[in-house]
Image (cartoon, rainbow, N blue to C red):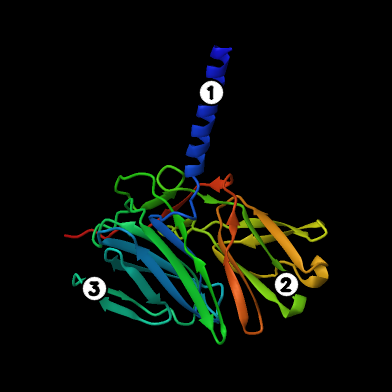
Amino acid sequence: MRKTALIISFFMVLGLCAGYAGAQQVNNLNEPGSLLVFPLMDNINYSTIIEIANRAATDVWLEGYVIAHTAADPTAFVKKDFIIHVTQKEPFLWFTNRPYSRTDAHGVMTQIPSFAGYKGFVFVFAIDDDKNKKEIQWNFLKGDALLYGGSQAFQYNAIPSQRLTTAVGDRVLNLDGVEYTRSTSQIMFEGFASGYSGISGILAVCNLDIDFIQSIQPQFDINFECWNQNEVAGSRHKAFKQFAQYSLYPDLNLGIAQVFTPKFQCATTSTHPLWAIFYQWVGNLAWGGNVWQHPATGVSTAVVLPPVPLEE
């Protein structure tokens, strides 16, 4: 009996360890990371403020990318990089619809152009310096975004990925559960049906499967399974590439006439990871934030960055 108990205990420990290891492969939304994703920067319908906090006691360099389009052509995306120097314990504040130019306490200048009139997503990650630009482990970053316009405002937290290795990188961000934590392919959100008491809503989604060298970003489907308050299910399917804002109606067919009840909930399935936020509004009131992500549906992806030019 004692031998059997020991064997059972041994396998229970193995199971717990395996579960913990698996959990570490998917990004932890409640912990700082080395990479931050802001799924929505909207300077067309709103103005967007991005804040990035460095919780470490030393300075760090960050490389970032904005991938966005104008209202005139939602299909043509601008891809623009920038470098930020963030001092120790600094909350870096960036009004994305204005030019940013600042010299910090250590004499380092950071300059970022204005993205007024653009809508899209932003991601940043820690690098060794502004010359080599090799990605590093720096799990001290947290962030949030504030969108405001007219009498409306809402806020969400940046989605972090923790770096799992201390080795200096190679200009490829492998979100594979080995180099960085993976992200989920199943997001979950719930809200009020469009049209109920005049309410509207948007699901903003982006994807980081990007090859900057070959200009490749795959197209795939996002499948939505939704339920109303009577537990009646219905599916929706949307083609997706790199960034989209889906209205509850007509895009997702989640109007009150289609849902039949004031509330709904949805879960997605996909072959690729998704970074998303969900927000709603009525009149001058807006609310929103992060969606839920399923911890057991992590999918590997990679961001292939452009190489640093050689110097003579």
Q: Earlier in the sequence, mark 3 or mark 2?
A: 3
Cα distance in 3D space between marks 2 and 1: 53 Å
Whether residue 48 sits left or right of residue 60 in the image: it is: right
Name the residue beneath numbered marker 1: 9
Can you give x and y, in whole percent of width and height, for residue 80 in the image?
40, 70
Residue depicted at x 56% and y 18%: 5
**Front position in the image: 77 or 40:** 40
Assign a secondary structure to mark 3: loop
Q: Residue at x 60, y 73 (%)?
A: 287
Amino acid, disc 3: Asp
Which mark, residue 249? Answer: 2
Looking at the image, tell me whether mark 1 or mark 3 is earlier in sequence order.
1
- Where is residue 280 shown, x and y percent of the image? 64, 73
Residue shown at 66%/55% (left/top)? 268
Give the residue at the far front of this rendering.
2
Q: Mark 2 vs mark 1: which is more N-terminal?
A: 1
- Checking the image for residue 104, the label placed there is 3
In the image, is residue 264 above or below residue 170?
Answer: below
Q: Secondary structure at mark 2?
A: loop
Query: Where the N terminus falls, by quadrant?
Result: top right
Whole-percent x, y for residue 119 in the image: 51, 75
- Mark 1 element type: helix
Q: Is residue 292 left or right of residue 176?
A: right
Q: Nearer the viewer, residue 91 or 149?
A: 91
